[in-house]
Image (tube, rainbow, N blue to C red):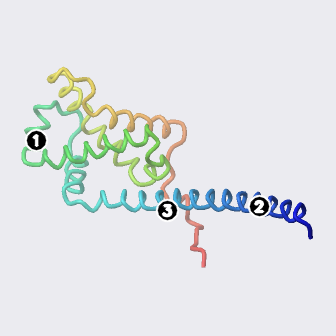
């Protein structure tokens, strides 16, 4: 084999090496995205494990609707800290969904119903806080998120998972 043929083989080998590195890099990036998505999903489930969050959700779910800010705060007195924790969690999730830092389907499966109920129970409270504080952005992302879920469910009512996936079985 002469030097010219050897250099051509070396060039081919170099190109194949670069192509292999590109494919491997793409695979690694794809795998990293999958791992991040799984980690985010797991982290998201931890929200429900917080006693403050769980208590806030329980209290809000058992609240009457359409209470003014004064009535709401009086009705809940010592529970307001937990309720605000719940509401700020929805606020954060709404902003993350908008910025595509959190997967819509994941959020919907975990939280859609809870977000809508929370918003319905606190809508007047939020309006009053906005007016009292001259700040129209109070809980803007929670409202935005609840409205997106409500709009989706107006056109396509949710089917409970135990019905929708009744024929599902684990892959063995």
Q: Quadrant of residue 133?
A: top left
Residue 29 lies, with reference to residue 84, above or below; the image says: below
Q: How many marks?
A: 3
Judge by depth and name the residue closer to the eye, 30 or 108: 30
Number of other residues with Cα within 10 Å of mark 2, as a class: few under 14, some 14 to 19, many 20 or more: few
Residue that carries the numbered disc 1 in the rendered image: 75
Element at label 3: helix
Check the image and report above or below for 135 versus 143.
above
x, y (%) of residue 29?
A: 56, 57
Label of residue 16 in the image:
2
The quadrant where residue 170 appears? bottom right
User: In the image, 151: left or right of 141?
Assistant: right
**Label 3 neighbourhood size at 10 Å, few (<14), some (14-19), many (20+)?**
few
Question: Cα distance, mark 2 to mark 1?
Answer: 71 Å
Residue 93: x and y in percent read 36, 44
**Label 1 residue SS:** helix
Q: Which residue is mark 3?
A: 35
């Amino acid at each position: 084999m002469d030097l010219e043929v050897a250099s051509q083989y070396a060039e081919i080998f170099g190109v194949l090496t670069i192509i292999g590195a590109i494919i491997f890099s793409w695979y690694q990036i794809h795998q990293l995205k999958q791992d991040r998505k799984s980690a985010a999903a797991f982290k998201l489930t931890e929200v429900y494990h917080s006693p403050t969050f769980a208590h806030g959700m329980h209290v809000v779910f058992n609240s009457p609707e359409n209470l003014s800010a004064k009535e709401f705060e009086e009705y809940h007195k010592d529970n307001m800290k937990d309720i605000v924790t719940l509401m700020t969690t929805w606020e954060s999730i709404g902003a993350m969904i908008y910025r595509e830092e959190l997967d819509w389907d994941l959020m919907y499966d975990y939280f859609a119903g809870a977000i809508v109920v929370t918003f319905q129970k606190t809508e007047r409270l939020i309006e009053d806080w906005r007016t009292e504080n001259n700040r129209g952005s109070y809980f803007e992302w929670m409202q935005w998120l609840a409205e997106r879920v409500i709009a989706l469910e107006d056109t396509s009512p949710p089917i409970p998972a135990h019905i929708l996936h009744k024929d599902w079985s684990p892959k063995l």
